[in-house]
Amino acid sequence: MTRKLLFPLLAMVVVLISCSDETTVFEENDDNLVVEQDASVLENSLNFEDSGVLDFYPDQSASSNYAREGEEQAGDYPLSLVAQINPPSYSGAENLTASHIHLVNDYVYVSYNTAEDDYAGAMDIIYVGDPYQPRVTSRLYYTNADINSIKYENGFVYAAGGVDAEQSATADANSFLAKIPVANGRFNTDAGISYAFQEGFNATDVALTNAGVYVTSGKDGYIRLYDKSSLEMINEAAFQDLRSLAINNDKIAVLDASYGVRVLNSDFSQASDIAISGDFREADKRTLDYYGELIVVAEGQDGAGVYNAATGNLVQRLEIPISPENVEQGDIVTNAAAFNENVLLMANGGAGLCLSENDNGVDLVGIIALDGSINYVETKEDYIFAASGRGGLQIIKMNKPSQSLEESCVDTSRYSGSSNLTVASNQNLGYNGSNRFNSITVEGQLLLCGTWTVRNDVKVDKEAAFDMRGTLIVGRNSDRKDVIVEENAILRIEGDFAIYGNLILKKGASLEFLGDANRAYITGTVTQEEGATVTGEFNDMNNRF
């Protein structure tokens, strides 16, 4: 059954619902659907307090990060926290948390639901085209519905959620799919919202392909395929308790909490299955994701299972690596797992966000140093999005080096060494890579090509030279650090230069920007002593020069 609902922001809306040859008229109060009109509310949703360099919690058992003598080595994955998005909040819905994320080009589409018994939700559109200045461009509140999953394509958001059908004049089932117009990064509810309803306690996931819109619903629900344009149902199949779906070419994998993974053909006939006795619980979020011929499944207290999609065999069991003190055991669960190329991320609740890499087997890199319980993770391209309960949505940039940058630095060697990089006065060194440092001190000459984060100070000593091509990020807002260029020293930048702290150019020091695509993002102050110069073209993003 398909519904077309129009919501011009009036006190009452008349809704025409067509079913077969019957037409019934309902009245729907538009107070249940509200577009945020206050720009200050959207602006204040952004939190930059902890923005900057992200590290991993220290783990002496991760031997790959430590030299034999115990010195900490420079780590891979120079992550940075772009911002935190405080979850929407309104009367009766003070405990919303991010439930799903979809990144398309420069925009992130976020859905929110509530763990409370009542139904309440919201959706955000967030611009991340500039990783230093993200902004929430639009917010839509659903005061009577959970929004559990979200996708965007060609000017429309497709949202799956749940509503109390007994309290709704329009819904004949709890699970629904909404098709919402979007223009220029903003919800356009005046253009009309299309709805389709299906059986099941709550719609749990949505996916888009050329064939249409796939929606799963849990607790005696269905997987359904809808036409993208009309939302007319094309096909359906009943299952006991669907939580998530993932699509790989012509195969559709669904996570049925009553059984495990069921791999379906395009006509919903079953191709294969994987029996899993995992910790799926009652109505908890659990996900699955494809990585080539592998399927990774979030299995609660059992961590994540990696399975061969064709044979159903368990390839590897990924246990939750830590059990923090003062965290209830029931909150140490893997709720979601997702691949980004060869990187696997696991949202482990009170045990944090775990990053591993798949290279002839999945090996732990570490636990990303984020606060709060991590309840959901999504990753795509150069971004990681982690939902941390009431802490909001955390937007993380992976800072992957571009291939063209790596090719331009072919004469340099890959960096492998101490996290405290020191270049002696008689040294002329050049490295490429993507690493996170504790500190950098240059007394001679250094060329770095790639992406680099530094959690403490960077110092270019007297008459030394430091050239950087790519991205260099120093400090974080909650722990600000300095870049100090001493007397007659030179710092050359080609790319992005971010300091969560201060830039100090001593007497006769030079800061040179090479090329015409440079950006300088400095949250503190810029100090130029006598004779210090700044030359070249760059975007001074915070007007500090």
Image (cartoon, grey):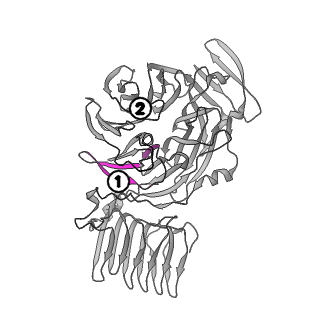
Decide whether residue 288 is among the magenta residues: no
- In-image side of 249 versus 520 (left or right): left
Question: Disc 2 or 1, which lies upstream in sequence?
Answer: 2
Answer above or below: position of 338 versus 134.
above
Mark number displayed over residue 384: none
Report the residue marked by disc 2. 280
Check the image and name the residue furthest to the top: 21
Q: What is the span of residues highlighted in magenta in the rendered image?
A: 353-379
Q: Residues within 10 Å of mark 2 (few under 14, many from 20)?
A: many
Check the image and name the residue furthest to the right: 11
Of 412 and 148, the residue lying toward us: 148
Secondary structure under badge 1? strand
Q: What is the magenta segment's predominant secondary structure?
A: strand
x%, y% of residue 142?
Answer: 63, 36
Report the residue marked by disc 1. 366
Residue type highlighted by circle 1: Gly
Residue type highlighted by circle 2: Phe
Location of residue 487 by image quarter: bottom left
Of 484 and 54, the residue lying toward us: 54
Q: Quadrant of the N terminus?
A: top right
x%, y% of residue 228?
Answer: 52, 28
Q: Residues within 10 Å of mark 1 (few under 14, many from 20)?
A: many
Check the image and name the residue furthest to the front: 326
Secondary structure under badge 2? loop
Q: Quadrant of the C terminus?
A: bottom right
x%, y% of residue 411?
Answer: 26, 68
Q: Residue at x 58, y 30 (%)?
A: 178
